[in-house]
Image (cartoon, rainbow, N blue to C red):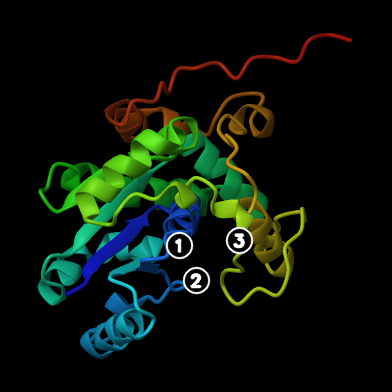
């Protein structure tokens, strides 16, 4: 018998970081790519294959992370008995800034954050889900990893806090580097570099990206409602650089 955990949420919300931390548990099998299996006509053959790989590796805990599976939560429930779903959330302003850095435009990131987190908000109190904010994970990693482990049935291991000591390359990447983060090879290099560093707090970068204020879609109307629902302050001023 194995446990089955699925990590999802809006992209750029820390899903790879959490998956990499759980991958440091020697009892967990965590494929280092996004399967999108619940977008297939029938995900069950893929599930059987992953379960077999988990057992053949001598593991007892299967963990899969595809952020867009947030749109397929009902399908996960239909196909996976005992599934545990980790819903990750991050300050929408930082998500928007990250999308802009990667894609060079804001609208896609804003729309993705709004759409995905409407679902997260509706699902956060379900008995088979747990909500995890990126900011809580990086600021109180042991406390929140223990909560996730208790919820999923994955045993907590100190090695998960030292995940960076064994480097893992995600998404078929061949190397890691502090690259620009732009779409394509540079983005893959940067993501792999980021998730293989000792834990650091990457929150608040929106203040530099949006010195005149965050995108209105995130901090007004429904965006502001969602921000507050997850404990963020949409009215926070980014501040101004000190005069030289």
178 horizontally vs 155: left or right: right
Q: Mark 2 or mark 1, which has the lower sequence index?
A: 1
Q: Is residue 28 above or below residue 45?
A: above
**Residue at left 72%, top 69%?**
185
Measure the C-alpha gap from mark 2 to mark 1. Answer: 9 Å
Front position in the image: 81 or 125: 81
Nearer mark to the viewer, of 2 and 1: 1
Residue under circle 1? 23
Image mark count: 3
**Residue at left 28%, top 57%?**
154
Can residue 118 be seen here? The reply is no
Are the residues flagged by discs 3 and 1 in contact, CB closer than 8 Å? no
Give the secondary structure at mark 3: loop
Label 2 Cα crowd, 10 Å radius (few <14 / some 14-19 / many 20+): some
Q: Position of residue 35 (x, y in %)?
A: 40, 77
Residue under circle 2? 32
What label does residue 120 carry, if any?
Answer: none
Are the residues flagged by discs 2 and 1 in contact, CB closer than 8 Å? yes
Residue under circle 3? 166
Can residue 1 be seen here? The reply is yes
Give the secondary structure at mark 2: loop
Instruction: Farthest residue to the right: give it.
Output: 244
Q: Mark 3 or mark 1, which has the lower sequence index?
A: 1
Label 1 Cα crowd, 10 Å radius (few <14 / some 14-19 / many 20+): many
Measure the C-alpha gap from mark 3 to mark 1. Answer: 10 Å
Give the secondary structure at mark 1: helix
Q: Is residue 228 above or below residue 153?
A: above
Q: Position of residue 111 (x, y in %)?
A: 42, 50
Front position in the image: 114 or 191: 191
């Amino acid at each position: 018998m194995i446990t089955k955990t699925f990590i999802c949420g809006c992209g750029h919300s820390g899903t790879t970081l959490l998956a990499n931390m759980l991958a440091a548990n020697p009892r967990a099998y965590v494929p280092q790519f996004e399967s999108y299996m619940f977008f297939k006509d029938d995900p069950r053959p893929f599930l059987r294959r992953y379960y077999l790989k988990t057992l053949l590796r001598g593991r007892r805990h299967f963990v899969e992370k595809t952020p867009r599976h947030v749109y397929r939560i009902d399908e996960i429930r239909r196909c996976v008995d005992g599934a545990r779903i980790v819903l990750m959330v991050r300050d929408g302003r930082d998500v928007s800034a990250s999308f802009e850095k990667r894609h060079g435009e804001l609208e896609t990131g804003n729309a993705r954050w709004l759409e995905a987190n409407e679902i997260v908000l509706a699902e956060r109190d379900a008995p088979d889900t747990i909500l995890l904010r990126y900011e809580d994970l990086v600021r109180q990693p042991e406390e929140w990893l223990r909560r996730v482990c208790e919820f999923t049935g994955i045993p907590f291991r100190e090695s998960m806090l030292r995940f960076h000591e064994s480097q893992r390359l995600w998404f078929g990447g061949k190397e890691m580097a502090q690259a620009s983060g732009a779409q394509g090879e540079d983005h893959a290099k940067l993501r792999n570099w980021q998730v293989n560093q000792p834990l650091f707090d990457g929150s608040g970068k929106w203040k530099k990206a949006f010195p005149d204020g965050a995108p209105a879609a995130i901090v007004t109307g429904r965006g502001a409602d969602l921000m507050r629902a997850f404990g963020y302050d949409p009215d926070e001023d980014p501040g101004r650089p000190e005069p030289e």
